[in-house]
């Protein structure tokens, strides 16, 4: 049997990201893993939640895997992908994923995306259609708006095939067990093709900013006015016509969300957002606080000079590790001129990639990827290397 890779679930960020990325890479490489003390650093309770189990069960089918510990609340999980010569042919990627709660649709999408892109078990490059049911706007998770406006354009830039998104029903996280739905159409890489290496450098100047705000329609006038004022304050050189604002009625005073996306002259997307998570005592006051916080955070991101924002940086790690050649991402400089320290999420993603793929990231945020070809059985590569060294 392939060597079991042991992963301590409390490493670095110690949350669900470690689990999701490890599952994706284990399924792609057919390497068995054991994750202990899952989400051990989470204050609200450790162990597997419904959102995590949705990804686990999807990968069980997709990798024809056996699992131990795949149940709600479990703090340990063993995942054994099928390693047979026809394992790719056995793959069954479920076309519907029901989280069973308003858990984050975006996080499940992030987890399964690399597997779908690189599976390559047939010569067909027809888009794979998957409907995920859960929450579209969930705290500490990528919103549907962020996925559409920032993540997908960035993935297209690095060479991934097109991905389309269709919102079915919106669902905000909360005590209700109602769920929304999003349909993703993901085009896989052609069989035998690798993702080329990519470099994000020299961002260029900011040429436009788009604001997307979800709030009660009664706030539209205030929101539009204050967004214009905030952008003028933080970005005085930006022409007034370079700001666009999209407003959507959230239907409830407690449902407030703002996304600001800046686009550079070289096409890079830098964003900040906030799903308002405070008690709304005064709606006008909440709108003001929302706009002030997100605009100031966007200004800080842009002042770093990097080509991606903090949240995009960790989402690119897995694609750097899987690409063919040296890929690097400029995360910007701090006030002392040193490289901005990657977030714990980014550091965790790099650690998982190192444990499962053997890649190493340098201080410039770059690494030499393994050059995984779509449909390749990575374990055979590892086995042949081991035979050579005997």
Image: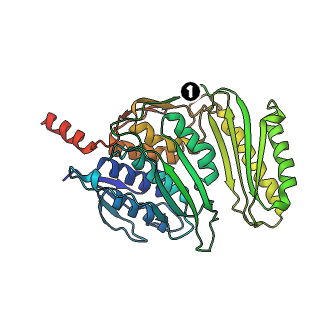
Residue 356, percent from left and from top? 33, 46
Which residue is farthest left? 390
Quarter of the C terminus within the rendering: top left
Q: Where, by quadrant of the figure, is residue 309 drawn?
A: top right
Residue 188, percent from left and from top? 42, 44
Q: Where, by quadrant of the figure, is residue 219 drawn?
A: bottom right
Q: Where, by quadrant of the figure, is residue 319 drawn?
A: top left
Residue 76, percent from left and from top? 36, 64
Which residue is farthest bottom? 176
Residue toward you, 162 or 15: 162
Q: Which residue is mark 1?
A: 201
Categorize mark 1 by other alpha carbons within 10 Å: few (<14), some (14-19), many (20+).
some
Residue 364 visible from this viewpoint: no
For this view, does 97 lie left or right of residue 147? left
For this view, does 260 lie left or right of residue 75? right
Residue 150 visible from this viewpoint: yes
Q: Which residue is depicted at the point 50% across and 70% down?
A: 100
202 lies above or below 42: above
Residue toward you, 43 or 246: 246
Number of marks in the image? 1
Q: Which residue is depicted at the point 42% across and 51% down?
A: 21
363 lies above or below 353: above
Residue 23, percent from left and from top? 38, 54
For this view, does 74 lie left or right of residue 168? left
Q: Which residue is depicted at the point 46% across and 66% down?
A: 46
Residue toward you, 23 or 212: 212
227 lies above or below 192: below
Secondary element at image label 1: loop
Q: Which residue is depicted at the point 39% across and 49% down?
A: 115
For this view, does 15 lie left or right of residue 216? left
Colouring scheme, one of rainbow, by chain, secondary structure, one colour: rainbow
């Amino acid at each position: 049997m392939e060597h079991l890779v042991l992963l301590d679930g409390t490493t670095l960020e110690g949350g669900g990201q470690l689990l999701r990325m490890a599952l994706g890479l284990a399924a792609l490489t057919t390497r068995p893993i054991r994750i202990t003390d899952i989400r051990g650093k989470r204050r609200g309770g450790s162990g597997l939640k419904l959102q995590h189990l949705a990804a686990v069960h999807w990968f069980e089918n997709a990798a024809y895997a056996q699992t131990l510990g795949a149940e709600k609340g479990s703090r340990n999980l063993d995942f054994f992908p099928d390693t047979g010569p026809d394992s790719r042919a056995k793959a069954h990627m479920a076309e519907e994923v029901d989280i069973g709660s308003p858990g984050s649709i975006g996080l499940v999408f992030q987890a399964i995306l690399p597997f779908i892109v690189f599976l390559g078990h047939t010569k067909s490059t027809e888009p794979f259609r998957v409907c995920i049911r859960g929450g579209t706007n969930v705290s500490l998770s990528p919103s549907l708006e962020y996925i559409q406006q920032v993540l997908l354009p960035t993935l297209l830039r690095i060479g991934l095939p097109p991905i389309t998104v269709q919102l079915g029903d919106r669902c905000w996280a909360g005590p209700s067990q109602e769920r929304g739905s999003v349909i993703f159409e993901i085009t896989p890489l052609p069989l035998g093709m690798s993702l080329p290496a990519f470099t994000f450098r020299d961002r260029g100047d900011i040429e436009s900013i788009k604001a997307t705000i979800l709030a009660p329609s009664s706030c539209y006038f205030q929101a539009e006015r204050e967004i214009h004022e905030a952008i003028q304050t933080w970005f005085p050189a930006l022409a007034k016509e370079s700001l666009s604002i999209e407003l959507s009625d959230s239907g409830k005073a407690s449902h407030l969300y703002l996304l600001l996306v800046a686009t550079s002259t070289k096409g890079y997307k830098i964003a900040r957002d906030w799903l308002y998570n405070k008690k709304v005592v005064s709606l006008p006051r909440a709108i003001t606080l929302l706009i002030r916080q997100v605009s100031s955070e966007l200004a800080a991101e842009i002042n770093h000079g990097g080509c991606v924002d903090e949240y995009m940086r960790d989402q690119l790690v897995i694609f750097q590790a899987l690409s063919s050649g040296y890929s690097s991402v400029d995360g910007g400089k701090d006030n002392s001129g040193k490289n901005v320290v990657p977030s714990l999420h980014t550091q965790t993603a790099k650690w998982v990639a190192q444990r499962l793929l053997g890649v190493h990231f340098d201080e410039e945020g770059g690494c030499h990827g393994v050059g995984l070809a779509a449909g390749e059985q990575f374990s055979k590569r590892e086995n042949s290397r081991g035979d050579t060294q005997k």
